[in-house]
Image: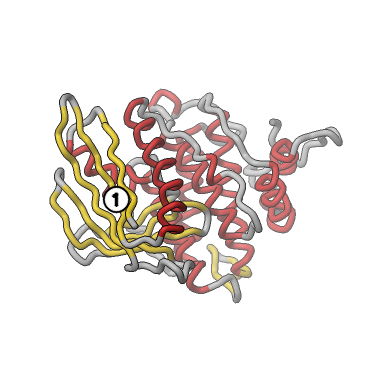
C-alpha cells in the first residue's frame, strides 16, 4: 500500500525543496526538531511529536526536483527505520510548485494511519507557506504519560515558535524577568542551554550567525537526544555544581518553558500551555528552584494566587511572575 498526495505551494521548487530537507523549515510544519545530514546515505531524525522519532537515510537527492529517503519509527517494531520509502517531487506549476509526496511500503493499516498524519502535516505546510508565521502544533500540546524528556519536547516546541516570531523591534522590550530585556533574556536562555549541553559533553557548535530560534532548537535537540541515550541516572557537572541528571533535565524544562512564556508576553505573542504540562513543570519547578535561584533575580518570590487559578497561572506565580 502507498500514500500519495499532491499539494500546491505558491513558491518556487528550490524553496519547496528546502521545506522538506532543512531542519529550520521542517520545524515549521511537521517536526518539533530535526537533525538532517543531506547527502546520499545521510541520516535524518525528526521529532514528530513528543518522544516520537522518525528516522531514515537519503537514497536520492536532486535539489529543487526530488528527494527520496527510507522512513520508519524508532520505537515502532512494525515500521522500523528503513522499512518504508518516501519520495517527494517538486514540479513547477503556474506561479508555484506542485509538491507530491508518495509513501510506499506500508500495510493497509499503516497506510490509513500515515494518511491521517501526512494529510494533517501537508495541510500545515500549505498554511505556513500561504501565511508564513510559526504556529504551535496542537498535536504537541498535551501528550500522555509526561516525563522529563517528553515535557522538554513540548517546551522546546513552544520556545522555538516564540523565538521565530520575535521581531528586531521587540529586542529592547522589558520582560517579566525584570533584570532583562528581550535580547538579554534570549541570550540568558541560550546560555543556560549551552551550560546544560556542556554538562553532557555536547559542544555548542551552532553557527553564531544563525537565528535565535535555530541556535536554541538545534542545541536543545542534541541535549534531548543525548539524555534519551544515556538516561537520567547519575550526576552531571553543571557550572560549578554536581547535580543529579534528573535535576539538570528539570532545569532544561524550566529554561525552555518559563522563559518562552516570558518572551511571548514581552513581545505580544499569544501562548497556550496545556494544564497537564503546566502542572507537570510546576511539580519539577518545586523540586528545582532554590532560594539562591530566587535571589539571582531570575525567579522572584512566589506570588499568591486564588484557589481557582489555572495551572499556568500557578506555574508563573511559583516562579515569581504575574500571569
Res 302 visible = yes
**Left or right: 174 in relation to 304:** left
Q: Is residue 71 above or below residue 166?
A: below
Q: Residue at x 16, y 30 (%)?
A: 93
Frontmost residue, 255 versus 299: 255
Res 216 visible = no
On the image, the x and y values in percent for residue 271 come to 57, 33
Q: Is residue 69 above or below residue 16?
A: below
**Left or right: 179 in relation to 94:** right
Q: Residue at x 67, y 43 (%)?
A: 299
- Neighbor class of circle 1 (other Cα within 10 Å; few <14, some 14-19, many 20+) is few
On the image, the x and y values in percent for residue 313 come to 72, 36
Q: Is residue 83 above or below residue 322?
A: below
Q: Residue at x 52, y 41 (%)?
A: 158
Q: Residue at x 26, y 31 (%)?
A: 9
**Mark 1: which secondary structure?**
loop
The quarter of the picture where the C terminus appears is top right
Location of mark 1 (residue): 207
On the image, the x and y values in percent for residue 12 come to 18, 33
On the image, the x and y values in percent for residue 153 come to 52, 53
Amino acid at each position: 500500500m502507498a500514500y500519495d498526495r499532491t499539494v500546491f505551494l505558491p513558491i518556487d521548487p528550490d524553496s519547496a525543496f528546502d521545506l522538506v530537507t532543512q531542519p529550520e523549515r521542517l520545524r515549521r510544519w511537521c517536526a518539533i526538531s530535526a537533525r538532517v545530514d543531506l547527502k546520499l546515505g545521510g541520516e535524518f531524525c525528526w521529532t514528530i511529536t513528543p518522544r516520537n522519532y522518525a528516522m531514515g537515510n537519503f537514497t536520492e537527492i536532486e535539489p529543487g526536483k526530488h528527494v527520496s529517503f527510507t522512513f520508519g519509527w524508532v520505537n515502532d517494531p512494525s515500521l522500523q527505520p528503513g522499512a518504508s520509502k518516501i519520495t517527494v517531487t517538486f514540479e513547477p506549476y503556474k506561479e508555484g510548485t506542485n509538491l507530491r509526496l508518495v509513501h510506499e511500503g506500508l500495510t493497509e493499516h499503516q497506510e490509513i494511519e500515515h494518511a491521517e498524519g501526512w494529510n494533517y502535516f501537508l495541510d500545515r505546510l500549505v498554511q505556513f507557506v500561504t501565511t508564513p508565521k510559526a504556529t504551535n502544533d496542537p498535536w504537541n500540546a498535551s501528550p500522555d504519560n509526561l516525563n522529563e524528556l517528553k515535557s522538554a519536547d513540548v517546551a522546546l516546541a513552544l520556545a522555538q515558535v516564540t523565538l521565530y516570531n520575535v521581531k528586531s523591534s521587540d529586542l529592547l522590550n522589558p520582560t517579566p524577568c525584570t533584570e532583562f530585556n528581550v535580547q538579554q533574556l534570549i541570550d540568558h536562555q541560550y546560555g543556560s542551554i549551552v551550560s546544560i549541553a556542556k554538562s553532557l559533553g555536547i559542544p555548542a557548535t551552532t553557527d553564531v550567525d544563525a537565528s535565535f530560534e535555530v541556535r536554541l532548537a538545534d542545541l536543545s535537540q542534541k541535549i534531548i537526544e543525548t539524555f534519551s541515550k544515556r538516561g537520567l541516572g547519575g550526576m552531571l557537572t553543571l557550572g560549578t555544581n554536581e547535580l543529579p541528571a534528573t535535576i539538570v533535565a528539570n532545569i532544561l524544562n524550566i529554561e525552555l518553558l518559563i522563559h518562552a512564556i516570558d518572551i511571548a508576553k514581552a513581545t505580544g505573542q499569544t501562548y497556550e500551555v496545556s494544564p497537564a504540562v503546566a502542572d507537570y513543570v510546576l511539580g519539577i519547578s518545586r523540586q528545582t528552584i532554590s532560594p539562591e535561584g530566587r535571589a539571582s533575580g531570575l525567579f522572584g518570590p512566589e506570588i499568591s494566587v486564588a484557589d481557582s487559578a489555572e495551572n499556568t497561572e500557578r506555574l508563573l506565580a511559583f516562579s515569581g511572575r504575574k500571569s
